[in-house]
Image: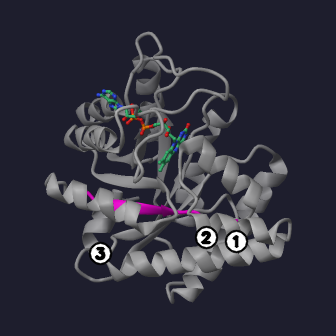
Amino acid sequence: MRFIRDIHAAREGTGKPTISFEFFPFKTPEGEETFFGKTLPALLTARPDYASVTYGAGGSTREKTLEIVERIQNDFGLTTMAHLTCIRHTQAEIGGILDEAAKRGIQNILALRGDPPPGEEWAQTEDGFEYASELVAFLRDRGGFGIGVAGFPEGHIDCAEGREADWRHLVGKINRGADLVITQMFFDNADYFRLADYLNEQGVTAPLFPGIIPVASAGQIKKFSAMCGTTLPKAFATRLEALGDDADAVRDYGIEYATAQCHGLLERGVPGLHFYTLNKSQSVLRILDNLGLA
Ligand code: FAD
């Protein structure tokens, strides 16, 4: 498998964006069967460049991340990045997870702070890391991994000093050794380009991959956006409201909106498109088809 930074570098200047997919660990054997038997094979028809698998804030899905990444890489031949969070881990435990990742042939890690479970406050674990930037430095010193980090076009929800302060922290993560950034979902491209311009002004050359979510349910997107502080533009929210519980109509509108968003991003030469698939294939494939990228 390859470093994602090398996949990106091979594309630079060709005008062809990378396509990548994010998955989360399934909770049941049926979920696993559907994912490996149907969803992933369907998504592979779009010839993605890489994938990533999230890391649960706590509980059983944590162990699954490395296992799933290994299986996607070995059985399906797709370079896949494992997410890893600092929360509730000591540095020694993180070191053990990285040893295990290396043994499984994993070469790319998305270094994150993580969030506490709902209702709990963020607290640094004794002998753990406070910020993702410390995990980045740990990874860099250890060597052997390509390092990604999260970026927030509207600023991180916990950053009381505002958007630019959070962006400064992002530059800190990059300066400590990250070689790519994946953004949180956003619905107004102006937010992405504001962050991209800021990073450019700071001399950052690491690619900023926009994270795109095809909306499948109005309730779900309201919940997600409230949790992570993403703004739903007024016209978008009004239209979703009007579509109500008509699941097919909401899905079609989600596809239409994400297609338009991707068009706008591609027109200005983004390095790639990173899709939050929610472990589903249909909407993402239709968006890529609309864009002529499937
Ligand atoms: P950090 O970069 O550490 O930032 C956290 C907060 O601290 C921010 O407000 C930042 O501005 C502030 N900060 C950073 N450095 C400093 C400093 N030096 N001084 C003062 N303040 C500082 N969560 C999961 O649990 N599992 C996942 O798999 C997962 N995947 C994700 C993938 C993507 C692409 C994104 C965008 C998010 C993901 N998350 C995941 C959510 C993420 O863990 C949370 O958003 C978390 O709250 C912040 O993580 P971070 O890595 O950006 O943290």
> In the rendered image of this protein, does residue 40 appear above or below residue 227?
below
Q: For residue 175, which quarter of the picture? A: top left
Q: CA distance from mark 2 to mark 3?
A: 35 Å
Q: Which residue is mark 2?
A: 235
Extent of the magenta region: 206-215
Q: Position of residue 6 (x, y in %)?
A: 28, 63
Q: CA distance from mark 1 to mark 3?
A: 37 Å
Residue at image position (25%, 67%) is: 9
In this view, which residue lies farthest toward the top? 126
Give the side of residue 252 with respect to residue 257, left or right. Answer: right
Q: Position of residue 177 (x, y in %)?
A: 23, 41
Q: Which residue is mark 1?
A: 239
Q: Position of residue 25 (x, y in %)?
A: 66, 46
Q: For residue 226, which quarter of the picture? A: top right
Q: CA distance from mark 2 to mark 1?
A: 6 Å
Give the structural element (helix, strand or loop) at label 1: helix
Residue at image position (62%, 34%) is: 63
Q: In this view of the protein, which residue sits in the foreground, 82 or 85?
A: 85
Mark 1 or mark 3: name the one nearer the start of the chain.
3
Residue 47 is at least partly visible in this image: no
- Which one is in front in this view, the residue at disc 2 or the one at disc 3? 2
Q: Which residue is mark 3?
A: 11
Residue 38 is at least partly visible in this image: yes
Residue type for callout 2: Ala
Q: Position of residue 58 (x, y in %)?
A: 64, 28
Q: Pointers 2 and 1 in contact (CB under 8 A)? A: yes
